Amino acid sequence: MKVGVVKEIKPDEYRVALTPAGARELVQRGHDVLVEAGAGEGSAFLDDAYRAVGATLASSAEDVWREAELLLKVKEPLPSEYPLLREDLVLFTYLHLAASDELTHALIDGGAACVAYETVETDNHALPLLAPMSEIAGRLAAQAGAYFLEKPLGGRGLLLGGVPGVAPGRVLVIGGGIVGYNAAVIALGLGANVTILERSPDRMRHLDEILSGRVSLVMSSTLQIEESVVDADVVIGAVLIPGAVAPKLITRDMLGAMKDGSVLCDVAIDQGGSAETSRPTTHSEPVYVVDGVTHYCVANMPGAVPITSTKALTNVTLPYVEAIADHGLAEAVARDPALARGVNVLHGKVTYEAVAEAHGLEYRPLEDVLPLAPV
Ligand SMILES: NC(=O)c1ccc[n+]([C@@H]2O[C@H](COP(=O)([O-])OP(=O)(O)OC[C@H]3O[C@@H](n4cnc5c(N)ncnc54)[C@H](O)[C@@H]3O)[C@@H](O)[C@H]2O)c1
């Protein structure tokens, strides 16, 4: 199969959908890999690295779009790319279609098979192509918390890990999922005193097994949050209720009781944020202050570390890319229900129920639109 990789054109997006290591795997399996010149630069993968593993470099994005049978991207197509969509193309990328009416219609009109990273879902409801971005955001949140505690940056002027003879700072993580666990691990590594509030008993048991004795694990409730934020130097908002906006667990009143110069890293900001006072910020202006509390609410945290993010993303996408390239989309989805759940739009039909619902469009089950090849 001809597999294409283009440079991302969304502002501040430095990731690329395939590393040279991934290109090598595909070439080794007999596929042609066509990469737009400069596509990997933002992630420190230069053109020569792709050439060296047998990929072909193309001077224009249009050439890659036209020649590819399977096009790999990181972000959704932008309006300038809509005319490049076509019937016999498989597009594999993050799409987040429920959030965009315009994009959904562009993909329907374009006729391509559009497979979204974020809805590839295993039978036990794990989202393998979202998990690495949560891992990165969680780890970054602990770093950001430590950094913005520094006095010249408006913080309390506290070293999170303390020193011998001086107590460490306190980190409160609300939500012990992937983000929360990773934030806790890095905060622990920095030497902080860490508490995780979680409301799923099963998740709590799991965290107890892997972190026992190293963090305080406490059942989350409004009262508990109210009491815990008062002592915290860094609060990390890491809750998720699937398919819903984040609950506003930290109210304006609670903020008033927090320490002056403490830091709130609201990682859940991409779902609306877990504090009443949270609003999305950017890497160029990551923080603002409300009632003496520094709010760090960057909505695309992994964008700050594209080298790591690109490698982590392609580690998890490559097996699916290989499956589509080796077998074609029809057989690949027949072999793997997790990949089948990733197909959002196909031949102009919406094949992902939540996206159809979000835009009041007709939902067509995948098997009605794509005759599944027998395995
Ligand atoms: N800002 C960014 O760049 C960025 C990047 C990745 C993920 N995120 C966001 O981070 C959030 C967490 O993602 P995740 O992958 O860790 O999700 P996850 O599903 O792995 O974990 C969420 C956890 O929150 C817990 N929870 C739900 N309600 C709670 C409550 N009231 N109190 C305490 N815990 C509660 C759940 O039981 C679950 O364990 C999501 O909103 C996600 O979209 C943001």
Image (cartoon, grey):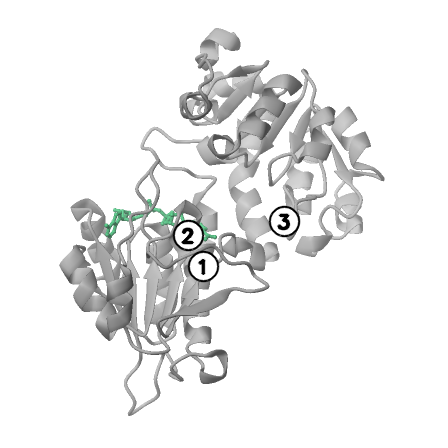
Instruction: Give coordinates of residue 128: x percent, y percent.
Output: 43, 39
- Name the residue rendered at 28%, 54% in the picture: 176
**First in sequence: mark 1 vs mark 3:** 3
**Residue 104 locus on image (x, y percent):** 55, 25
Give the left or right position of residue 14, taking residue 232 as reference.
Answer: right
Q: Which mark lies nearer to you, 1 or 3?
A: 1
Of circles 3 and 2, the one toward us is 2
Up/down of 1 relative to 117, above or below: above
Specify the label residue 15 is tagged with.
3
Q: Residue at x 26, y 54 (%)?
A: 249
- What residue is disc 1 on? 297
Q: Is residue 217 visible?
A: no
Label 1 sits on a secondary structure element that is loop
Label 2 – label 1 distance at C-alpha: 6 Å
Indicate the position of residue 99 as horizontal and vertical percent values: 48, 34
Q: Is 293 in front, or is 143? A: 293
Question: How many neighbours does mark 1 have within 10 angstroms: few (below 14), some (14-19), or many (20 or more)?
Answer: many
Is the residue indicated by label 2 positioned so its CB lies within 8 Å of ligand 1? Answer: yes
Residue at image coords 51%, 31%: 97
The mark that comes first in sequence, 2 or 1, is 2
Q: Quadrant of residue 360?
A: top left
Q: Are marks 2 and 1 in contact (CB under 8 Å)?
A: yes
Residue 141 seen by the camera: yes
Give the answer, above or below, for where 242 lies relative to 311: above
- Residue of label 2: 269
The answer as to whether callout 3 falls within 8 Å of ligand 1 is no
